[in-house]
Image (cartoon, rainbow, N blue to C red):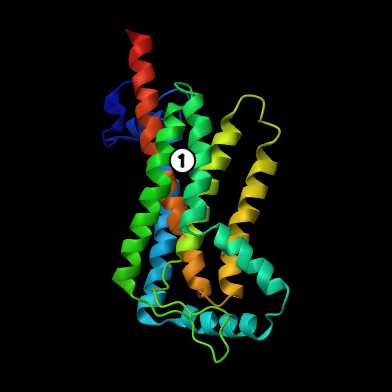
Amino acid sequence: MTERHLSAPRSPGAFKRFLHARLARDHHLGLPLSTGLLAVLATALLFALIAYEVHTHGALTRLDQQLADWFNQRAFSPLTELVLGYTHLHGTIGVLAMSAVLAFFLFRQRPRASAWLLTLAVTVPGGMLFNYWLKFQFQRVRPHFEQPILVLHSYSFPSGHTIGATLFYSVLAAWLASLPGNHARRPAIIIITTILTMMTALSRLYLGAHFFSDVLAAMLEGLAWFALWATIIFTVQRHQLARKSSN
């Protein structure tokens, strides 16, 4: 299998060989790269659709307001205090602190976990900064209520808390699932980290800090950002290992 398999196929036979190469599990340009790119494209496309709805004030924005009013009218103590505690844990400082703890464990496991350490370092702070830039591109005003729980003056779309949780728990889940002996635990790992991420998104809705489309877009953006950098980093790592083994 060679690099020329990446070139566009010119015949049915060439197309079959091209497709087979892209589905090969044992090549750095095979199945892992293909699935990673598909994940990036799918999540980025869904994010773009939501962003278009927000930009054009489409039907999704009407659902946004209905859900925002529904949560605001049903907020009660002591649930509100519990939700505030959980959402603050997944603010910028909280996510970066949890990432620092994970980075410490990964650093101690070098060189075996070097790729995961780099993925964490690029994914979490990089994705949060990118999201901050996006907020200023859309400049969406946050939900407004007569009796608000939180009053925030920053922009709303996409949700910073939600993308922070999405990025951190994506790296954590992928790393834990990759550990030897964790094959049987993978479904539980994915379910738990997904629940923790969705709870963060739900906390932002409950508190009236964001619209539904804000948190949904942030989760898709976070998944796309994680898939992009994880695909790049681990494709490079597999390529380097393949070159070493061939020498």
| Residue found at x 36% / y 49% | 126
Q: Is residue 22 visible?
A: no
Q: Is residue 227 left or right of residue 1?
A: right
Mark 1 residue element = helix
Residue at the right extreme? 78
Between residues 216 and 49, which one lies in front from this camera angle?
216
Q: Give above or below for 126 relative to 112.
A: below
Give the x, y percent position of residue 163. 47, 58
| Residue found at x 27% / y 37% | 8
Occupied quadrant, residue 152: bottom left
Q: Is residue 61 left or right of residue 4?
A: right
Q: Is residue 119 visible?
A: yes
Q: Give above or below for 165 relative to 137.
A: above
Occupied quadrant, residue 207: bottom right
Between residues 14 and 2, which one lies in front from this camera angle?
2
Between residues 137 and 1, which one lies in front from this camera angle?
137
Give the x, y percent position of residue 75. 67, 80
Q: Is residue 144 left or right of residue 22?
A: right
Q: Give above or below for 236 relative to 96.
A: above
Occupied quadrant, residue 54: bottom left
| Residue found at x 33% / y 64% | 134
Give the x, y percent position of residue 184. 71, 32
Residue that label 1 marks: 35
